[in-house]
């Protein structure tokens, strides 16, 4: 095990740290405030890292970059402020172990400055892997579910590579759910704990969304939560997604997996959600690009054609929320 660095390497001058990191000073203040001097966690030993990255489904090209930027104590890539941020980011996420709200692990970094900058939050995730696996064990969660859940890291890194880095700012916050024990991958779907009575459903990019695979995953969740989180009383499944936009039915066949998925839900009345531009989200999940001009996007599938034609007609996609009872 090697410690990522002391929390006190850099003096507590947020303006100076922010300038060196090239990020807004408010972001550094936020890390200071949330992490304080709470405990960090060590990274795995460098020698163990390749096997761990493999278990986390990190592909060889991403694994090679992560190993190249490894935060060894004497690595010249790791400036004091980067070491400070890594250490405090781990502490920030760890302080909310068991939490299930969205949580940014720290500021968005300029990732083109090398592997330490590019993968700082991946190193934080690796340090937190041991912490959250202990949390999983305390809740009786099996090793299989634990690793399947945490392996979303590799999937997201591969998608980010396809997206030429455009995907990462959202992913760095998304992955803190896994690292805090807030989300579990049970077969086809990811199941997100909540404060109230709903289990949130997320759909990873892992092949077709067949009704059979969904049924199996819902059944797994019905057994999983009472067993491992008996104090949480869920009565419904919920989902917020571009996949629930009823306008998709104008384009997709009735027997498509997306339309069949939609039919499970009772939709809430439409409200433009704060902070989500659904047109951008549809481009993210359909094309894995946020910036390619519409005319240059592929038109291979019925969905790809639908997404572009809809936007070119001056219409907009909707981010919709729906629920259905747990027992249904
Ligand atoms: C959700 C998902 C698995 C559905 O795929 P699916 O099971 O193939 O869905 P359908 O059967 O309804 O597909 C209908 C048509 O749309 C196409 N299609 C579906 N999802 C597509 C996608 N993400 N990109 C391009 N085309 C897609 C299918 O190929 C099919 O077209 P075709 O008949 O011309 O081949 C897929 O869209 C996906 O992996 N999305 C990324 C993850 C995601 O969006 N999660 C939700 C985040 S809020």
Image (spheres, rainbow, N blue to C red):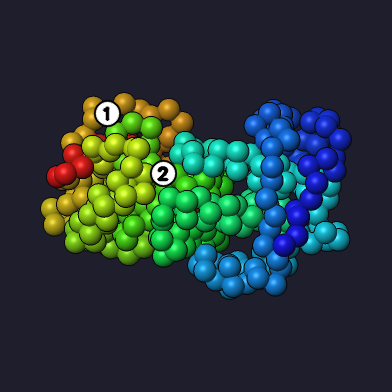
Q: Return the residue nearer the eye: 232 or 90.
A: 232
Residue 302 percent across, percent down from the top left: 25, 58
Q: Return the residue nearer the eye: 82 or 290.
A: 82
SS class of the residue under badge 1? loop
Placement of 66 over or under 83, stated as above or below? below
* Residue 89 visible in the picture: no
Mark 2, Cα crowd under 10 Å, few <14 / some 14-19 / many 20+, is: some
Assign the C terminus to one quadrant of the image.
top left
Placement of 311 over or under 203, stated as above or below? above
Placement of 242 over or under 197, stated as above or below? below
Residue 280 percent across, percent down from the top left: 43, 42
Q: Which corner quadrant of the image does residue 242 belong to?
A: top left
Residue beneath the point at 78% across and 42% down? 7
Q: Is mark 2 within 8 Å of ligand 1?
A: yes
- Marked residue nearer the N-terminal end (2 or 1): 1
Residue 49 percent across, percent down from the top left: 65, 68
- Residue 281's disc is 2
Mark 1, Cα crowd under 10 Å, few <14 / some 14-19 / many 20+, is: few
Assign the N terminus to one quadrant of the image.
bottom right
Q: Return the residue nearer the eye: 226 or 43.
A: 226
Residue 178 percent across, percent down from the top left: 48, 50
Q: Is residue 243 left or right of residue 145?
A: left
Q: What distance separates the C-alpha of mark 2 from that of mark 1? A: 16 Å
- Residue 270's disc is 1
* Residue 36 visible in the picture: yes
Residue beneath the point at 65% across and 46% down? 90
Residue beneath the point at 55% across and 38% down? 96
Residue beneath the point at 23% across and 59% down? 216
Q: Is residue 297 left or right of residue 324?
A: right
Q: Is residue 157 left or right of residue 78?
A: left
């Amino acid at each position: 095990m090697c410690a990522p660095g002391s929390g006190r390497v850099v003096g507590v001058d947020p303006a100076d740290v922010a300038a060196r990191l090239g990020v807004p000073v408010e972001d550094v203040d936020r890390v200071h405030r949330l992490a304080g001097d709470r405990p960090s966690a060590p990274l795995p030993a460098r020698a163990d890292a390749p096997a761990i990255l493999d278990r986390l489904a990190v592909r060889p090209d991403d694994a090679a970059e992560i190993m190249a930027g490894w935060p060894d104590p004497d690595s010249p890539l790791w400036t004091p402020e980067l070491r400070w941020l890594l250490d405090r980011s781990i502490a920030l996420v760890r302080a909310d172990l068991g939490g299930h709200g969205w949580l940014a692990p720290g500021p968005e970094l300029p990732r083109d400055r090398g592997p330490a900058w590019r993968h700082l939050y991946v190193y934080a995730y690796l340090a937190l892997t041991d912490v959250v696996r202990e949390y999983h064990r305390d809740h009786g969660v099996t090793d299989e579910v634990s690793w399947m859940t945490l392996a979303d890291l590799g999937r997201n890194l591969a998608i980010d590579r396809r997206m030429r880095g455009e995907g990462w700012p959202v992913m760095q916050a998304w992955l803190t759910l896994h690292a805090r024990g807030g989300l579990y991958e049970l077969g086809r779907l990811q199941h997100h704990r909540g404060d109230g009575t709903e289990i949130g459903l997320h759909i990873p990019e892992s092949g077709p969304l067949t009704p059979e695979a969904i049924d199996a995953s819902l059944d797994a969740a019905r057994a999983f939560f009472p067993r491992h989180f008996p104090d949480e009383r869920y009565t419904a499944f919920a989902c917020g997604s571009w996949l629930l936009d009823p306008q998709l039915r104008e384009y997709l066949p009735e027997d498509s997996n997306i339309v069949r998925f939609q039919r499970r839900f009772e939709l809430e009345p439409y409200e433009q959600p704060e902070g989500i531009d659904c047109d951008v989200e549809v481009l993210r999940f359909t094309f894995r690009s946020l910036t390619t001009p519409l005319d240059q996007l592929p038109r291979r599938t019925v969905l790809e054609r639908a997404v572009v034609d809809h936007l070119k007609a001056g219409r907009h996609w909707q981010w919709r929320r729906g629920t259905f009872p747990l027992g249904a």
